[in-house]
Structure formats: C-alpha cells, structure tokens
Amino acid sequence: MSFSITEPSNRQKWIAGVLVIAYALITLMPLAWIIATGFKTPADAIAYPPKVIFEPSVEGYVNLFTSRSRVTPEDLAALPPPETFYDEIVRQYDMVITGPSKYGERFLNSIIIGFGSTFLSVFLGTIAAYAFSRFKVPLKDDLLFFILSTRMMPPIAVAIPIFLMYRQLGLSDTHLGMILLYTAVNLSLSVWLLKGFIDEIPIEYEEAALIDGYTRFQAFYKVVLPQAATGIASTAIFCLIFAWNEYAFAVLLTSGTAQTAPPFIPTIIGAGGKDWPAVAAGATLFLVPIMVFTILLRKHLLRGITFGAVRK
Amino acid sequence: MADVMLQNVFKSFGATAALQDVSLTIPDGAFVVLLGPTGAGKTTILRMVAGLDAPDKGSVHIGGQPMQGYTPAQRNVAMVFQQYSLYPHLTVRENMEFPLKSPLLNTPRAEIDRKVAEVAQTLQIAHKLDNKATALSGGEMQRVSIGRALVRNPSVYLMDEPLSSLDAKLRADLRVEMKSIQANLGATFLYVTHDQIEAMTMATHVGVLDKGRLVQFGTPREIYEQPVSIYAAGRLGQPHINILPADLFGPAPRGAAFIGLRPEQIKQGEGQDSIVKRVEHLGDQTRLHLSFQNHDLITVTEAHTLLKSGDIVKIQPHNAFFFSADGGRIV
C-alpha cells in the first residue's frame, strides 16, 4: 500500500524540530545531571542552588573504585608522599586507600548475568519461535498463550516462592540462578517477538534452499537466521535492558558472589557519608555497556522498529 | 536427466481437493507444460515432484525410482518459484552459487565460477553479479532465479510461471533461450504457465488441468486440434474459441449442445450473413467481432481488410468441433 504524503512545509519542519529538541532536553536532563554529578566534588554535589558550572573532579570515580579508611592527621603526616593522583585526592580527606572496592566485581557480575541470560533467551526464543512459526505443533495456540501468560503478572509477584525454591536448590546468589531467572522472565517476550519476525520471512526461501540441496537445519541457519538478524538484534536489546536494569530480584536473591551492579550501587551511599558523586559515577559507568550494545546494533534496531512497514 | 511419473496422485489441503487421481508421465528430455487457471493444481504437481508436499495417495517416481520419503535435496531437482525467488541477504553471484555449494553438490571453486559465468552470460545478468539481490528489477530477479536452477544439472527442472513477471520483449527472448537450453542439455522440464504462447512454442507435451484433474495430455498440436472438451479447447488459441449453440448454423450431430469454432474453422465469404460489429487491426492480422443471429463471435481476417463495422460478411463453419451439454467433445 502506498500513501501520498505532501512534503511538510518549512514551518511544520521548524515546529517538529523544536518539539523534538524540547522532548530530548527533558528526557536527557536526568542523564546529564547524573553524568555531571559524577564529576563533582561531594561538596559541589549537594550545593544549593545546584552548581551548573563547576570545577570537574574525578573524586567520585576514585571513591567508586576504592575502599578507604580514616587515619589521624599525625599518621597521615608520617606516610611517605603520595605516589598517585588518587592517593593524593583521598588524603585530602584524612583517608588512605585500603584496596579496591567491590564495584568492579559487581559490574562483571552484571555483564555475565545480563549477557548470559540475553544469549540464552534469544537462542531458546529463536528456535522456539521457528518451531511455532513453521511446524505443526500440537496445541500451538494454547502453548503460545501459556507462554504469553507468564508475563501477565509482575514477575516480582512470585518473588517469595522463587526465593524459597532457590534456597532449596542452592541457586541463591549464584550466576547460574540469576541467568536462569532472567531467561525465564524474558523468554515469553523473546518467543513472541521472534515469532513475529520469523512469520514475516516467506517460507519459499527455505523451500528454495531445500531444493538447492540443503537440509532443513542448514536452510534454517543459512537462509532464515541471516534474515531474522534484525529481529534477533532488537529482541536481544530488549532482553538485555530488562536483565541489566533488574533490581528487585537482584536485591532479594543476591548478596555476595553473584550480586549485580543495581543492588550494589545504592550501598555506596552508606560507606563514609553520603557520597553522591561516587553513586553518580557508578550509575554513569553502568549505562555504558547497554549504550555500546545498542549503538552496535542500532542499524538492526531501527529496521526492527519499522519492520513490516517497508516492503522488502 | 530422468523421466518423471505421477501415479494416481491425490492431494487435498483441508477440505479443498487440490489433485484428484492425477497420472502423468514426463518422458526423459521432454518439455512438459502444465496449463490451467489458478487453483487447477499446477503448482501442487510441481511441489509433489520437488518433495515439498507429499501426496495423500498415489506415488511420484523420478528415473523409475519411487520418491516416497526422499527429501527435496535427495531428489536432485531444480525449481524456479513464481515469487520470493532470491535469497535477499546474498549477492546475485552468491545466489547463483548457492545450489552448487550445497552439501549435495559440493562443487569445486573453479567449476562454480565457470558455471556461474556461463549461465550469467546466457541470461544477460553478468554485469549484475556483484549486486545485492534486492537491488535488482523484477525481471532481473527472475532471471537470476532461473539462473540458480540452470547452474545445476538436476534430474528435472521445475518451473512455476518463471516468465510471468517479465516484460514482453524479455519474455520472448527467454522463451527462445530456455527452449534452446532444454534442447541442448536434453533436460527434462516441467513447466507451469498461464501463457498459451509459452505452451505452444516451448512444449513437447501439454497437460491441461481442471480443478485438480488432468483432463488432457498430448502434444500442443493435439491439444489444439483435438481438444477433448470445451475446457481444453479454451486453453489454447488466440483469439479464444467461439462456443455457440450447436444448431445455430444448421443440423448438428446427435447429442451435440454446442459448436466450437476457432477462427480458422469459420469460412468467410459463403454461408449466412453476419454483421461486423468491430474491426481490430493488430498489424499482422485483423480481428473481426461479428454478430450472428444475436450471438457474438470473434474471428480473424486478412491484415489489410477493408471491412468496417456495419458491413455484412457471410460465414460458414468448417470442420467445427461439437460438444455435448456437459462440455465433452463429440467426435
């Protein structure tokens, strides 16, 4: 189908441009605030009225990555001169660095659990969606409805049973446990999204590949998968965003070994006064992987959003 | 190359019977065209031979072997689809190489290059080989799709209206090209079309399908000159055969309900009067739309006729076909 659309007038373009910029400013405000706070000193961070222009400092980042303890001025004076810039910063507050903080570990946990569950959700989702799309599955509609229904209540509603089950199974505070949990939550989204994408790929391509001498599985990965790349990429982004940002289950089920960054970041506040710059620094860095991932896949994502609107 | 045989094949999709008791033998090296309107079962026959669908009853044989349980790959057939023919994520070259690189054929690199270059030359797409498949016009896509079949040397080529999306000039060129490829290779072709010119010019045999039944099978000439029914007679001939009440021109054989007149079966200049309603000059021929006793009929006359509408022409049947009330031919 084609619609004839008249070229928007210059005035319309201006209005649209202004609206888009205004909306972008509103949504980017908190982000800008977080990033800025990460580079303030603790004093600047709580200054009132808020400081828009300030002298940047990496104190927040130093505090984020280190554990420190307070020493008496006499002890401080007795120490050899600071060797690094971060030693110097910390000593201004009568403190010394005692070692690295847990942030790095927690961040790594987020990466392992986030990407692990995303991979698993998309992998299982793709093969399930392919089967639902192409084969006669007994009770297909009921199964699909059942899969969807797992998302009809907020996942946190089953937090207590899952907590108890995980304790029994020894999955509490394990990477595997968190990967399985996030995969279970994401799988319904993944199956439904991907089924839509695979349904749009005409079956003739696979039939052509079968006739061209390939097996069903070879046809799947040589012909269907490359064409589903768009759908797979957008599904992966949705799955990663959920797993990456998930807070409630992470608080409930992890405390040490497998703790992810979201429950960890707030705990930074408690360690030695309200250290807002360190919290903001932690939040800023936490945004980076998902931004990189989305930028890497943005070409697919854009095509994914407009999927079906454009005739191939 | 091999012969293909269908024996008493039945197939239905849900409540719709797609094929009913179809038996058909395609001799080795034959060019068989299946004719019939949409829904007659032409494509279903191709899919049965290819192994994309299995018959409900009956059997398919290729090269004398029963094909039941064989995958499309094991049958070694090449097929050109009517649409969605190219892999959109590959280039033209990769599309054409695709069957050669399959685990079935696993062709050496040099041989692939030679084959692709040769077929691309024939189909006039050599300059497009490194384009993305989606960056082609409809006609080019269909040529690549034909090329993907021609690079192979399968037991049978299956073609589902391969030329229908092309423009008239290209269609005429490729018609000749495909026929000569088939003749040179001695290949077996099973070819589906709506287009009677394709059927007449390319086929060694024509199969006429009506609602899932094979109603007539023979050479194009046999189908044209000895149709078994009104339906079969209507498949071939341009302009279309005229079907009129049997006794319109005089006494008819016993049981005849209709008389069938192709243009060459209408003798002009003798017989009874008809009125010229319209004259269509097509260049090489001229079509006359006549009215005879309140019945319309169309025939052909010489290109430079001076007849114009309102003129009177005498006409008379000559070796006409007669058909019974159910459409069957009375000989």
Image (cartoon, rainbow, N blue to C red):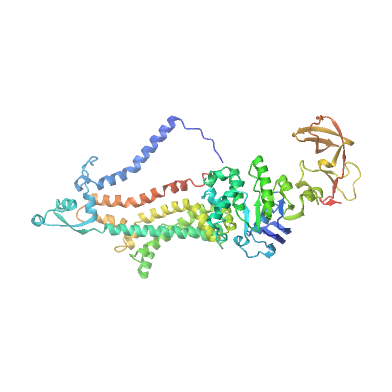
> At which x and y percent is residue A298?
41, 47
Camera-side residue: B160 or A148? B160
The quarter of the rendered structure image containing the N terminus of chain A is: top right
Q: How many marks?
A: 0
Camera-side residue: A78 or B123? B123
Tell me: residue B186, above or below residue A309.
below
> At which x and y percent is residue A251?
32, 60
For the point 25% across and 48% down, the residue is A38
- Which quadrant of the figure has residue B166? top right
For the point 47% across and 48% down, the residue is A304
For this view, does B283 lie left or right of residue A311?
A: right
> At which x and y percent is residue A198?
52, 54
The reply to whether residue B49 is visible in this rendering is yes
Residue farthest along the right direction in this orientation: B251
Tell me: residue A176, above or below residue B309.
below
Camera-side residue: B169 or A264? B169
